[in-house]
Amino acid sequence: GKVLQEVEIIKAQFATDPLPGTLPNPLPITGRFFFWGRMRFAYLGAFDALSFGAEPTPDPDKPDFLSMSNLQITMSFKVHKETATDRSKVTDKAFAFKSQQMAFDLNRSGWRSQSLYEKFPLKFKTFKTVIGDANALSASGYMPVNSPLPTAELGDIWYGIEYDLNLGSAGALAGSKGLVAGILVAWKPEAEGLYLGLKLPGSTGGKKEITIQGLLKIVFKSIRFESYSDPKPGVPDNTGYLLKLKNIVLKFMVVSFPPTGKTEIILFGDPRTADEVPLRKDKLLGWYASYVNDEPDFTPTSSNPPKKT
């Protein structure tokens, strides 16, 4: 596919659901195929959002997959008993793909050395499956994030990987509970592009805003993921990633603060190489904030001299 290049099955198992004590007519039967395997995702160039897969130059000694288990395909049907007038028959035969209960082993997985997962301190949360729910994305609370990649319209059938991004503590006055953001990398089967989403505490409905106490709103004009080249000795292709929250405004009803100027926050992943920080738990998230007052200065002219007091 456009996103998932390969699923390698390394183990399979079949089981039948237990039958009820009293057998009805017709009798529903459900069998389940369980699969263990490896998922390999496409390499998308400089902005490697999918992360799990082979390097541009494959390394046979390194894992290049996302290790998964408990992928299910169910086989169901109904068996009708033979009667004086009807022969035994099977009806309502159906197969169903069930990925909602999948589990993943990151210790057995491998990801590309210049990928988003490697360079941003993300924590794998879950594999998301949406079938037949056009409102699932807006209900999830993710705000759309622009990136160098084409943006996909997800619709009512899509898959995705959710990550947690630890933003640190809210400060001593807020207690020890940390602030955790959500990152979503999602795609529609056989479609071009990806949907990237950001979920912050208080974000709802897919809007680029956060509601505080039901009265205040923090509004973002744009949210964008970017990558940049940062060559280092021995690592000429070293890549960094930035998450930019631009033109941030605090709103109370119709009043905005600041009334003029531009506020921007940039989150950036740990720029150190894997040799410098071999353990993922030691990777850090940095941030930078700026405010620029773009209100024009008042310059008196001969036709508009300053008043004396």
Image (cartoon, rainbow, N blue to C red):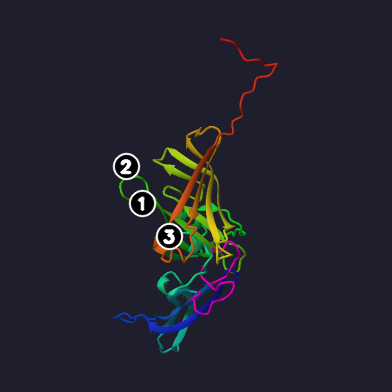
Residue 220: % across, % down: 52, 44
Q: Which residue was labeled with disc 2? A: 173
> In the rendered structure, are the residues bearing label 3 and label 1 in contact, judged by CB atoms less than 8 Å apart?
no
Answer whether labels 1 and 2 touch (C-beta < 8 Å). no
State the separation of the CA atoms marked 1 and 2. Answer: 12 Å
Residue range (magenta):
41-64
Q: Earlier in the sequence, mark 3 or mark 2?
A: 2
Disc marking residue 178: 1
Relative image position of residue 31 (x, y in whole percent): 41, 81
Of residues 79 and 67, which is closer to you in this image? 67
Assign a secondary structure to mark 1: strand
Disc marking residue 283: 3
The mark lying in front, picked from 3 and 1, is: 3
Q: Residue furthest top?
A: 309
N-term-proximal mark, 1 vs 2: 2
Residue 164 location (% of width, % of height): 42, 58
Q: Nearer the viewer, residue 87 or 171?
A: 171
**Quarter of image, res 229:** bottom right
Tell me residue 239's x, y (percent).
55, 61
**Type of the residue with mark 3:** Lys
Q: Which quarter of the figure has residue 109?
A: bottom left
Specify the quadrant that holds the C terminus: top right
Q: Is residue 46 left or right of residue 10?
A: right
The residue at the point 60 percent across, 66 percent down is 44
Q: Is residue 57 visible?
A: yes
